[in-house]
Amino acid sequence: MSASAPDDSLAGVLASVASAAATRFRGRNLMIRTRGTVHAVMWAPWMGGWELPAPACHVGVFGWVVDDLHPTADPVTCKLCLRGNGGAGARAGAQQLALDLDTADAGAEPVTPPTSSSG
């Protein structure tokens, strides 16, 4: 096989797809099909140890058809992406409120998880 011949092995095909996706989505946001919502990009594990771009909000992409994801320079409009840590438009200082789980004041008995028995 010469140095300029394409790598038709499975590993070569996966590397080619992942490399092309990385080039297309570098510094970009994404849209799924033609839905119009713009998502922040995160990199999700894929086959062969490669990563592909995915919506940062983790919205499902049926079948992981790479061609259904379109890079865009438009600003993120997905509310979930904007609220997440990776969203480009996330509000600075936005934090989740603490949940008070102290049940001692409520008179509730503490719950002890069951232990596994061997035998």
Image (spheres, rainbow, N blue to C red):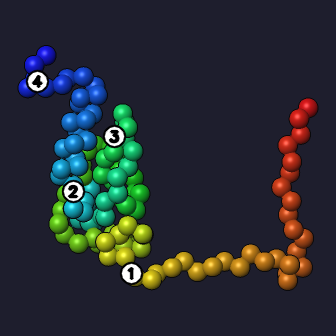
How crowded pointer 4 is (Cα within 10 Å; few <14, some 14-19, many 20+) is rated as few
- In this view, the residue farthest toward the top is 1
Q: Amino acid at mark 3?
A: Trp
Expressed as whole percent of the image width and height from the top left, the position of residue 9 reads 24, 22
Element marked by disc 2:
loop
Residue kind at label 4, given as amino acid type: Ala
* Residue located at (29% from left, 28% from top): 11
- Point out the frontmost of discs 2 and 4: 4
Instruction: Find the distance from the CA under tag 2 to the CA under tag 3.
Output: 15 Å
Residue shown at 26% from the left, 56% from the top? 32
Q: CA distance from mark 3 to mark 4?
A: 23 Å
The residue where tag 1 is placed is 91
Q: Nearer the viewer, mark 3 or mark 4?
A: 4
Image marks 3 and 4: residues in contact by CB distance under 8 Å: no
Secondary-structure class at tag 1? loop
* CA gap, disc 2 and disc 4: 27 Å
Residue holding disc 4: 3
Residue bearing mark 2:
26
Name the residue beneath numbered marker 3. Answer: 50
Which residue shows up at 86% across the image and 48% down it? 115
Q: CA distance from mark 2 to mark 1?
A: 23 Å
